[in-house]
Image: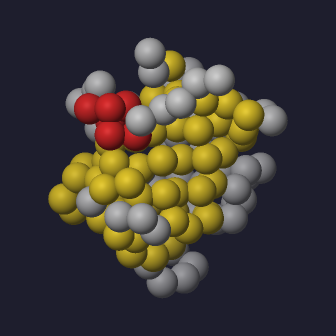
Amino acid sequence: MEKVSLAEAFDSFDETWSPRLAGELNGQAVKLAKADGEFVWHRHEAADELFFVHSGRLRIEFREAGDAVLEAGEFTIVPRGTEHRPVAEPEADVVLFEPSETRNTGNVESDETVTEPERLD
């Protein structure tokens, strides 16, 4: 049995918008990401995505609905197929829960696309 300290895990890397794989269960991935500024507009056609803010503030913008503003200790689930853009001002540490094969930029290819996230040690 392995435990993960979120504080230590987030302290172990500095790159923003480059998720790290913290664990997997039942075909789902627990990923950690540092967010700073605006990410790309994208959607995940076949996957819901949970955003849990560990520290900081994250605004998730939606084209079809109002924004969701998340403070530390709060989460939201973005339903599959929903176009969204995460924005952190200032930086936020975010826990993501989604199917293991989910690419961070969904249907968009960009410089920020990560196809295989680095595993935390």
Kindly identify the residue that appears in the image at 35 percent across and 69 percent down: 71
Q: Is 78 displayed left or right of 90 in the figure?
A: right
Residue 53 placement (x, y as % from top left): 41, 58
User: Along the line of sight, which residue is nearer the eye, 114 or 119?
Assistant: 119
Q: Is 25 displayed left or right of 11 in the figure?
A: right
Extreme residue in the bottom direction:
66
User: Along the line of sight, which residue is nearer the eye, 107 or 11?
Assistant: 11
Please, is residue 29 above or below residue 119 in the view? below
Kindly identify the residue that appears in the image at 50 percent across and 72 percent down: 62
User: Along the line of sight, which residue is nearer the eye, 31 or 54?
Assistant: 54
Please, is residue 83 above or below residue 62 in the view? above
Applied colour scheme: secondary structure
Residue 102 placement (x, y as % from top left): 65, 38
Residue 74 placement (x, y as % from top left): 46, 68
Residue 49 placement (x, y as % from top left): 63, 54
Please, is residue 21 above or below residue 55 in the view? above
Kindly identify the residue that appears in the image at 53 percent across and 30 percent down: 3
Image quarter of the C terminus: top left
Where on the picture, by quarter, is residue 67? bottom left
Where on the picture, by quarter, is residue 5? top left
Image quarter of the N terminus: top right
Where on the picture, by quarter, is residue 108? top right
Can see residue 19? no
Can see residue 16? yes
